[in-house]
Structures are given as C-alpha cells and as structure tokens.
Image (spheres, helix red, strand yellow):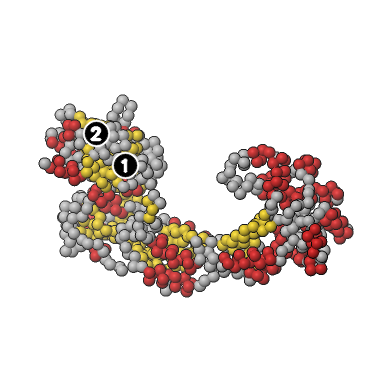
Amino acid sequence: MNIPIEKSIPLSVTYPSVVERYFTQRYIRREGDNDTRILYHSNKICLVTLAKSHAIFKNGAVIKKVNFKVGEKLDRTNNKVSGKKKHGGQRVDEHSILCLVECEDDSVYTIRSGVKGKLVEVNEHLIENPNLLMTKSETDGYIAVVLQKLGVECDMSNSVSKEEYDKVVDE
Amino acid sequence: MASSPLPLTHEKFNLEIIEYIQDLGSCWRCAMRFTREREPEAYQRKIVDLKQEPEEKLLKTSPCVICLGLIQDQFINECITDEIAQHVIESDYDSPTFACMVSLPIAIMLREQAVWFLTTEKFPKLLSPNFTVDHVTSLKDVWKFVFSKMLEFKLKKKLAHSSSSFQIQVSVLYPDEISECGALVDMCPEKFKHRYKQTKIYQEGIFTRNAAHCVLAGMSSTNFQKFYSLKVPNVNAYYGAVQCFHTSRHIAGRYQKFSRKLCQTPWLIEGEKHMDTSIQELICQHLEPFFKTQSVKFSSSGREDVDVRTLGLGRPFAIELLDPHRTLFTQDEITQVQSSINSSTDAIQVRDLQLVSKEQLSRVKKKKQKIYRALCVTLDGSTLTAEDLIRINGITELVLMQKTPLRVLHRRPLAVRPRTVHEMKVTLLDDHPGHFILRLKTQAGTYVKEFVHGDFNRTVPNLCILLGRPVDIVALDVDAVELDWPPALFN
C-alpha cells in the first residue's frame, strides 16, 4: 500500500491546469471587444480576468496604468473585508466597474465585474506591474476576486461557456 | 438516635418535633429529617408492617404532606426498585458503580418550606443561625438511604455518590405540581412574567428549582403563609422516566490514508452525502458497536485534502465516545477492533489505537510540523538543471506570505499568513521529463499545493518564482505529522 508517489497516479506529458482543475470558465463578450472571462469556483469564489479576445491584445496597446479609482469617491483598493463572511466588502453587480485600464495611446478600457457579489480583493500586483494584464492575463494577471452570495445558485446567463466562446473566437 | 446536634435535651425534644410534624400529616421519615438525622440506618427501618395492617386502613392513609408518599411506608411500592433496575439492566451499561440522581417535584420544596415555618413557630428554639431549612436532611438523601441498598443488590453495581461516571436519573412526578406551584407566581410575579412567553427555554415548564429557590430564599413566614397553606395532598407522587448516562470516553490513534478519493469527514452538500464514505466513518463504524455508543466526535491533528495520501506513521486522531455503554475492556480488545478496521478497507490503516484521558486531548490540536512529498511538473516541459537543484536544496527557513487560498477563501477570512518552509529537497524523476519530487518540511498551516503553483501569485514566494518558470503539482503525500502523541504501541 506504500506505493511511491510517482506510481500512485498515472503520469502523462500534460495535466489539467490549476484553472481547469478548480474553475468553470465563462466568457462575456462586450461591445468594442471589451471581453472578460469569469472563473467560477464551486465554492462561490469568482475571479475576473481579461479574455484573450479583448481589444487590448489586438490594438497593440501598451498599458500605462491600471486605475482602481473608478469613481469620485470609489477606490477599489480601499476595499476591506473581515471575517469568514467578508463583511465590509464593496458590493458589485454585473455592470460595476472594477478598474480602468489606461494605455499609452490615451485609450481607456473600462473593466466591469460581470458577476454579482462582494468584492474580496483586487489584484494589487497590477498597480506596480500593469503589464501582467498582457503577459499573464489568464493567471497572475487576474483583476479581482468576488464572492457570490452563498447558498444561491449562480446566474451565468450573461456569459457563454469556454466551448462556445472558443468556437466563435477562433473563427 | 445516633447523633443529634441540637443543643437541648435532644432525644425528648426531637421526639416532640417528630410528633408535631407527623400531626401535620407527614410521614415519620420526613418528620425525622427535621431533626437533622443523617444516619442511613435510622431511615432504613420499617415502622409500619404492611402485611399486618388491614387493607382499608392502608387505603385511607393520605400521602405524606411533604414527600407525597415517596418515602412513606404505605406508599412505597416494592416494585419500584425492580422497575428502575430493569430499565437500567436493559440499557446494558457495564459500569461497576453508579450514581443516582432523583429529580423531585417543586411542590415538595414548597411543602417542606411550609412545614419548616410551622415547626419553627411552634418550636422557636429550633431557630438558630446554624440551622435553616437547608439543613434539614434532604429528601433526596433519604430516598437513597431507603432505596439504594435494594438498587445496589438488583443492579449488582455499587452506589458511588459523585465519583461514578455512570449516572441513573430518576424523575418523580406529581399530578398537582402546576396548580400547587402557582403559589410561587403569586409570591413573585416578576420572576415568572417572561417565562410564559419563552416557551422554547422553558419547554419543561416554567417552574425550575432555581427559580423556586430564588423566590423562597429570604421570604418571611408571614409573607409565605399569605400565599400558601399546607394541605393534605389528594394524590401521591409517582415515578416517571428513568434515564441512564455514562460520561464520555476518549480513544486515540493514528491513521494512514492510501486513497486519493477519500474525505476525512463526511462531506455534506446541503445535508446530502457527497462521497460514499470517509475516514471518520471507516473508523467509527467499528467503534460504535464495540463501545455500544450512539454517537462519536472525531477530531484530528489537521486534515489532508481528499486527493492527498497520508503515509509514514500516519496522522494522530482522537475520538470522543459519547454515552458509551461499554467501558470495561482491555488493550488487547481495542487492538482487535483496530484489526477489524484495518481488514475492512484498503483505503486506510489505523495504528496505536488506545484509550486516552480527557486531559491528554488538547495535544491532538497542538501545532506541529509536517513533512510532505509533492510530485511536481514544469509546465514548459523543461528539466531542472543541476544548478536549480543545488539552489532549491540549499533553501532553509523560507518564510512565505500566504494569502488565504482561493479554494478555501469562502470559509476562512482573507488574511496574509506568514508560513515557514523549514527545508526543501528536489529530486528529478528519471524517464519523465519535467517531473520532479519535492520534499518539504513545513510549519503547521502551510498550504503546500498553493506554494507549488502560486495560487495566482497569491502565495509569494512560490516554487514558480523560485524556479523562474511555471510549475504545477500533480500529486501530494503527507509523509509525517511530527507529533509524538498518542504514544506508539508495539502491536
């Protein structure tokens, strides 16, 4: 029964990635190719990232700044949560703006949540290293973590599955 | 009488008191309680020989105004000890001793108080700072004097007043309880005002011993008599449910887990079991019938993920056996239970199973270092170089800043926790490009999977940063949980 670890599972060349293992990937296509991806964990934690079809990747833009100050009085970096239930987290819904991506050519992309819940954290690495959005858009360059309401079935009707998305985007 | 602490010509005075209280309608035993007699033998006599009393006279006798017949010869049903004993014997507890608790109607407290006031008015000499109604030999004690010998004989167990872990609870009920206790509400309406509404808290009734004690304490005789006058009861008290209970026993051991598809505890999603079984169930289904317990509480030194094996000596665990009916056993018998657990499954093995004391239990929760073995792979398929190995193997006491991993973030607060990796050792896996085995010694509470893949760079540094390329974890084993408890057994 003490099988060595390398014999305890089938080895292969590739394995499902962290994203594939833990998350359901959904895509939201928006006007002007302002496309985002939402990673749904079965525990109601969601990550918001850019989608590979986002306009920013096509236009050859160079990102100057990821600005989390999305309103006169609303700064996403001021978000503070406490306790298991993430008390105090800013409420966001589908249309809430998470950040503004400002490029060298003065274009600005508005990134919206796409999912309703409590903001748990924004990716502060993007402040020092905005380029993560380009280089690791699907992993370390995530934009924010949102916790959906527990005990309620999540509504994904505003998004499409990875299969559907790939079919449309790859055409 | 054996010992009477009253400062007068005791015998004569005591007889006067007894006679007076009996005239109030009390039985002789209750009357004697007011003389502070505490010798069991004094109460174990039988003054009325039931067989010689004509039957009508027996029927005419009213229940004692205090004990409602409970310790009154004419009302003592010889079968009662049989009934209690039979219930206890059927419950099948093996404890050689027992403690007995009798819960009495509150009406008896009121009645005792009433007799106290009447008696002390008649015999003011009785009153002294060191003799209050609380010093009257308690009815519960006298009940035990009268019944315990018989119970001991029938149960074949020894009465041990407070030292026994096995308790028999006998409740005495009285049909007129509620109407007689109404006087308490008249005496102190505020005390009970809210209780009528709080039906959940007071589902057993609003009249508790504590409340009665509060109301009666410090009440003057005149005040008391305004609301309550002693009456001969219409009916006698009777016996209600008999409940048995044994205090918890605890056993501990270590488990190895060989399956990557087994949870530690039942995984419930909205009350439904998500997996067929769990470590807890695999172990406890053998313990429950052996210790004859209905429920157990499982605890352990941390827990591994469903897909993680635990090898080496295994992970320490402890189980609280609630209300065990079986408490007499040998280590050999426990070892046999261990064998039956081990032969029932390939998914886990248990060792060092043993009885432990409650005091030792906190040790299972002590923070301890863990040794892990992780099978990892580079995502670009590259093989680690000799320099990579030297660099990684040289790292010691590396402090990680670990944000609560995404996969547990829904049930743990968001925080950045510093966690130390004490040692690291990488060995390449020949024939499998990009694969390597990482051995780690870490502080308790380190999430190893997240240390390897970085959890979206939320654990820093992580192995991807240390190696300068993306890596992922393919499989994880716990090789050791460094806790020297419970003691290793050689079997």
Q: Is residue B17 visible?
A: no
On the picture, is B267 further left or further right than A131? right
Using the rendered view, name the quadrant where residue A133 is placed.
top left
Please report whichever mark, 1 or 2, sits nearer to the chain's N-terminal start: 2
Q: CA distance from mark 1 to mark 2?
A: 21 Å
Front-most of A89 and B296? Answer: B296
User: Residue, x 69% and y 57% (percent of image)?
Assistant: B238
Q: Where does the image place residue B275, in percent across and percent down from the top left?
A: 35, 57
Q: Quadrant of the N terminus of chain B?
A: bottom right
Q: Is residue B231 visible?
A: yes
Q: Please state which amino acid type lies under the numbered disc 2.
A: Ile
Same chain check for tags 1 and 2? yes
Residue occupied by mark 2? A111
> In the orientation shown, which residue stands out farthest toward the front?
B56
On the picture, is B166 further left or further right than B402? right
User: Residue, x 71% and y 61% (percent of image)?
Assistant: B143
On the picture, is B57 further left or further right than B484? right
Q: Is residue B367 above or below residue B219?
A: below
Residue occupied by mark 1? A154
Front-most of B236 and A151? Answer: B236
User: Residue, x 85% and y 57% (percent of image)?
Assistant: B19
Q: Where does the image place residue A112, in percent across and percent down from the top left?
A: 26, 34
Q: Where does the image place residue B242, in percent across and percent down from the top left?
A: 62, 60
